[in-house]
Amino acid sequence: MASNLVSIERRRFGQTMRKDGWWVAPLLTFLGFSAFIVYSTWAAFQGEHYSFGPYLSPMYSPLIWEAAGQQLSGHAWLGAWPAWLPASILVQPITPAVLILWAPGGFRFTCYYYRGAYYKAFWADPPACTVGEPRHAYRGERKFPLILQNVHRYFLYVALLFIVILAYDAILATRFLGPDGHTHFGIGVGTLVLTINVILLGSYTFGCHSLRHLVGGRCDVLSDKPAQQTAYKCVGALNKRHMLFAWMSLFWVGFSDLYVRLCSMGVWTDYRIF
Ligand code: FES
């Protein structure tokens, strides 16, 4: 009698029958994410050149206190670095960016899209669909430590607050100090850079899976709630391009910091459009 039983052989790490370039996406993710982590860590520990005129690097916003030893830029909420706060622990500098980057960093790290991407790219778990992985046990996200990824929804609330703050920064980036000592409306290339930054970050944040669940995903029927249904559709439209906005916003945050930094260092000139 014919048998329908098929024996499935466990593949060795990297072994697959796929003929396509399955390794390209994880490799690009690895390179892109690594480059951002290296740059953002370096920038966060600098503690200088994070503002230029009305511009403030998004990696230092909100600027709670001016970095230790820096002159007041007008961006700090509470003024100079307080004496009770150490400027470094051992050899590790404590900067305004170090105080706040846990929030956007935690939001990205626990993002559903990024999780799928870096599990593949950094942990090879698995490297891609139907490609052999280096471990045999599957723990999933139901046990410690990966169960902590569920904190994402709480990071979302903080990330939404950051969008408001960065939008305010983009508005402040239109207020240039004139020769008369007063601020005047204007637009420089930096204004556009910071405005694009908040638009991309907003598109990424408002397309969050947790937000989609929050605004409508948890309801069985939305048709009798028109406002909620519209919000759900908007979040859903952004959610469809979540990966695109994740990468664009990641790149642009880094570029925005670089732009402000190089202008502050006198390497780049910030051109005024009007
Ligand atoms: Fe990506 Fe929430 S799922 S930001």
Image (cartoon, grey):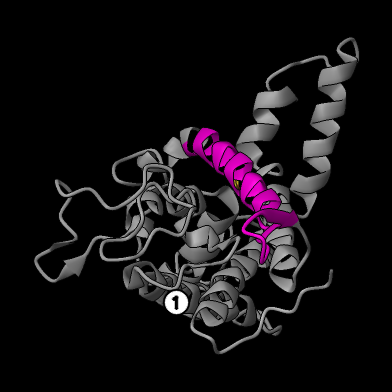
| Image coords of residue 209 (percent x, y) | 65, 40
Mark 1 crowdedness (10 Å alpha carbons): few <14, some 14-19, many ≥20: some
**Position of residue 215 in the picture relative to residue 81 (left or right):** right
Please state if 274 lies on the left or on the right of 218 as rendered: right
- Residue at the spot 56% in from the left edge and 75% down from the top edge: 26
For image coordinates 69% across by 48% down, the residue present is 202
Closer-to-camera residue (147/198): 198
- Residue 178 in magenta stretch: yes
- Disc 1 designates what residue? 39
**For residue 154, above or below residue 221:** below
Q: Per the image, is 164 magenta?
A: yes
Whether residue 126 appears in this view of the structure is no
Q: Which amino acid does label 1 sit on?
A: Tyr
Of all residues shown, which one is farthest toward the bottom? 267
Residue 172 shows in this picture: yes
Q: Which residue is drawn at 67% across and 46% down?
A: 167
Residue 65 place in picture, x, y as percent: 35, 50
Residue 171 vertical placement versus 253 (above, below): above
Question: Does mark 1's beta carbon lie closer than 8 Å to ligand 1?
Answer: no
Q: Which residue is drawn at 56% across and 37% down?
A: 161
Which one is nearer the viewer's eye here, 190 or 112?
Answer: 190
Instruction: Describe residue 88's horizontal placement relative to residue 197 as left or right.
Output: left
> Which span of residues is magenta-colored?
155-184
